[in-house]
């Protein structure tokens, strides 16, 4: 093959590759193709300030994962001097920074671009039916009493779950729920309490993390 023909083949290959990249961005990512077209996207920025401590220092951040109607199209990390690992599974993504020694406060940055995702797909596999939790007293008796009481006032799984969540929201009126919420200081801990209570009736649950997008923010 002559040198001129090699250049022609290379040029055609690059044109084909560029066309495939353009088609992917337009069809799959929804990028605008014409000057008067627009597309929606949101930018998520996180700044973590890490202060010195004795020995090694670690910091973790839950990252956006796939969610119904949205996807992460691009993300960047700025963490000079820190080692970075990203743990990924279908339901959870987490960035872990680590450094052996930190002499002064430093800032870690994360930036992601989120775009609409119109592809039809299931959010996650259906969780299995959980076993009834084996708890110590007095939590075991409190769980049994709560399940029996809510079951007598509900007609199906949906109404049972709604009743349990309502009792968690108005915990001051139910001593059994108050017992479980004594050490639940965060939203995630309260969600895990809900999982435990629903597991008392062998109702499968799935704990998810999400972000709220407001307009152009």
Image (cartoon, helix red, strand yellow):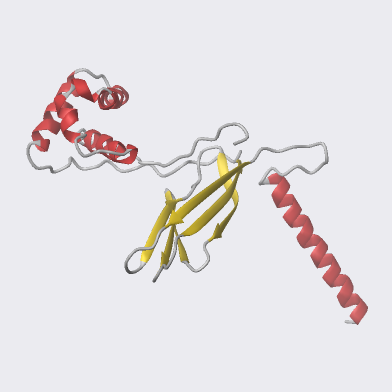
**Residue 163 percent location from the top left of the image:** 27, 22
Residue with the most extreme bottom position: 2
Q: Residue at x 26, y 24 (%)?
A: 160
Q: Closer to the camera, 102 or 98? A: 102
Q: Residue at x 75, y 42 (%)?
A: 32
Q: Where residue 118 appears, x then y in whole percent?
A: 61, 38
Q: Is residue 86 above or below residue 141?
A: below
Image: 124 above or below 75? above
Q: Is residue 48 above or below residue 1?
A: above
Query: Which residue is drawn at the image coordinates 35% and 68% (left, top)?
Result: 56
Res. 51 image quadrant: bottom left
Identify the residue at image location x=57%, y=51%: 111
Which x, y percent locates residue 125? 41, 44
Q: Which residue is at the far front?
A: 104
Coordinates of residue 136 in the picture (x, y in percent): 9, 42
For the question of whether residue 203 can be seen, the reply is: no
């Amino acid at each position: 093959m002559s040198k001129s023909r090699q250049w022609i083949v290379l040029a055609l290959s690059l044109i084909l590759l560029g066309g495939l990249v353009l088609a992917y961005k337009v069809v799959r990512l929804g990028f605008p193709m014409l000057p008067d077209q627009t597309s929606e996207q949101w930018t998520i920025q996180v700044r973590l300030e890490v202060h010195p401590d004795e020995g090694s220092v670690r910091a973790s951040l839950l990252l956006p994962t796939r969610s119904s109607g949205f996807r992460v199209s691009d993300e960047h990390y700025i963490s000079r001097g820190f080692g970075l690992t990203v743990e990924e599974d279908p339901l959870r993504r987490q960035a872990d920074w680590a450094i052996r020694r930190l002499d002064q406060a430093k800032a870690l940055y994360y930036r992601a671009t989120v775009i609409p995702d119109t592809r039809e797909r299931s959010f996650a596999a259906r969780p299995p039916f959980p076993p009834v939790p084996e708890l110590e007293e007095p939590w075991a008796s409190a769980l049994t009493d709560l399940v029996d009481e809510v079951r007598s006032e509900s007609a199906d799984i949906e109404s049972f779950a709604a009743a349990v969540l309502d009792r968690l929201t108005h915990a001051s009126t139910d001593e059994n729920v108050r017992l479980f919420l004594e050490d639940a200081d965060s939203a995630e801990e309260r969600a895990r309490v809900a999982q435990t209570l629903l597991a008392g009736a062998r109702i499968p649950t799935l704990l998810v993390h999400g972000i709220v997008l407001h307009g152009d923010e």
